Amino acid sequence: MNKFKNITYLCLIAVSLWIFSSCNADFVNTSPLDEVSEEDVWSDPALAEAAVTGTYVGLGQGGFDEQMLASLTDEAIFTHPGRDITVITESRSNPAAPGWINNTLEWGNMYSYIRACNVAIENLTDPLLTDQDLVDRLMGEAKFMRAYYSHQLLRYYGGFPIVDRAYELGEESYEIPRNTWEECINFIVGDLDEAATLLEGKSMDSGRASRMAALALKSRVLLYAASDLHDIPTASSQSSLISGYANPEYLGYTSGDRMSRWQRAKDAAKAVLDNDEGNLLNLSGPVSHEEGIQNYMNNSLSKNGGEEELIFARYFINAKQENGGRQGLFNGPNGYNNWAGNTPIQHFVDDYEMMDGTEFDWDNPEHAEAPYENRDARFYASLLYDGAQWKPRSSANQPKDPLGQIQTGQYEIIQNGSVETHFGLDTRNSSIEDWNGSYTGYYFRKFIDPDPSIVDQNTWQEIPWPFLRYTEAVLNYVEACIELGQEEEARTWLNRIRYRVGMPAINDSGEALRERYRNERRIEMAYEEQRYHDCRRWMIPEETLGRKANGINIVGEFKPGESLELYRYDPEIYDYSYEVTPIDPGKENRQWLDKMYYLPIHQNEMNRNAQLVQNPGYTE
């Protein structure tokens, strides 16, 4: 019996060997079903494109996260506690607890996506793909995205360790020192120049890198490079912290011709202007005020011509969103059942000019009596303020406000035959929701679709986030012209922006022109993650970002002989008073310390890489 078993086993082994030797080799050497080999990815056009598309994931939701960078500036405050935003606005950031840092700029996250770009670049350098046009396009996109993530590191942290290859497991060392500011600038610009060449003539889908995107990002990078903060002799004269830092080469240029850097910035911006037209920037005079409001709304909503403004953007599709496109819910009024997350502060509101181009001034009795009248068109397209006409409220709440008007004050009304105080429906004493109203008396309107059929609390919106838009390049060009002493050219282009929104031409010169330009950039690029960097690179954060946040207190009292049972905004019935009030320091107590010019490199990263050097002002 044992002999029979042995023969049987031998026969089975022989049959098995014959079967395996006779089968197709592809069947024998089966690949795992839950993964794809690197060779398969980079030899298949669709998979290779999918891999490069994956490098865009680091862009997140653009700036449409619940916490916005605007609330780290003198544009807004964040309403809800416990998000670590005040760690930064109060200058309490440190390497172990840096405060709220969005994933779209966090040090480790940026390196994760830089690695993905490096993997793509390495596999496309000696490609397995036979379609050279596709190879060039994918290489251009990967170079652009590596430059984008690198510029995020540079502008938030200063000079960073340049990683231009994908490290492998088992290498002798993973430690690498920081590169100088100048080396980082040259590396980023080199990637962008290559991307622009590779993407020239390519038809790109919306949301993908393009030749114009490479030119526009180069314009931004070189503008920053020329600015005060990154000219170490200039920065050191204004900050003892920078002058005492042992490694200033990580923060800027320690020598060289600064005017040549401004010229490079001007040339880079002009390259964008020469290759595109933006939207309505060829006007010879200002449009009407109403047209100006609509033009700015179209630009911020990327509709009706405003699409032409976008160079590189994060797009959203209503049917397929999970976390994006909720700017209405995140920032809209609590009286519309929204969350009132990021709300404009009074400092920002006051910087909008009057329609005639003069400054708004609380000491002017006419301005103080009616602060929301006759303002720059962008005021009405960007802000929701007391009495502003907005959408219909929910069916349950329309009886409280049939007109759909923003109510951020307290007003007299007649109840049960006597005068009582009515708290506005969009205050923290609202009868609709009393826990999440604005502390400042304002809400965002920009980036929120005014279509009444779009109910912000439960409808996704398809408004794209503008990473790079044409007007930024125009403003970059204006700034470079001012610094080079070419004031007439600067005024020409600045007025084109103003004409589009119905504002009169400016004729300033010298320091007055520089200040006018800076305010124009503040207003035009509101909430677009520009102010955070502008105040730093101009080295004006102490008097801007360091100011205590403030808001408005509004009271409406009946005029003699008038009365009303259901409140509505009506200056014929009410005398309104406006008082600028500071935000309770217990809520947010802003201050500026020079260490906040740059974010700290997290202590975990310092522990991983002994060659890293921390930014000035942070103890290691």
Image (cartoon, grey):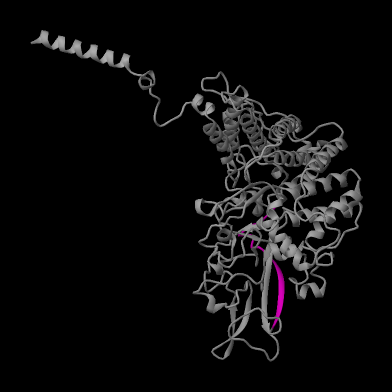
Point 39% across, 21% down: residue: 26
The percent position of residue 589, horizontal first and vertical second, equals 65, 56
Give the quarter of the image for residue 565.
bottom right
The percent position of residue 414, horizontal first and vertical second, equals 59, 87
The percent position of residue 402, horizontal first and vertical second, equals 57, 78
Q: Residue furthest top?
A: 3
Point 57% across, 57% down: residue: 461
Viewer-proximal residue, 543 or 105? 105
The percent position of residue 243, horizontal first and vertical second, equals 79, 37
Quick check: is 575 in the magenta stretch? yes
Q: Residue furthest left?
A: 1
Viewer-proximal residue, 38 or 423? 38
Q: Quadrant of the C terminus?
A: top right
**Is 102 on the left or on the right of 357, as rendered?**
left
Give the quarter of the image for residue 185.
top right
Q: Which residues are magenta?
A: 574-591
The vertical placement of 138 against 355, above or below, is above
Viewer-proximal residue, 537 or 35? 35
Q: Quadrant of the N terminus?
A: top left
**Is 595 on the left or on the right of 567, as rendered?**
right
The vertical placement of 527 against 25, above or below, is below
The vertical placement of 553 against 606, above or below, is below
Question: How many numbered marks are there?
Answer: 0
**Is 284 on the left or on the right of 46, as rendered?**
right
Point 70% across, 86% down: residue: 559
Viewer-proximal residue, 407 or 19? 19
Quick check: is 172 in the magenta stretch? no
The answer to whether residue 171 shows anywhere in this view is yes
The answer to whether residue 541 shows anywhere in this view is no
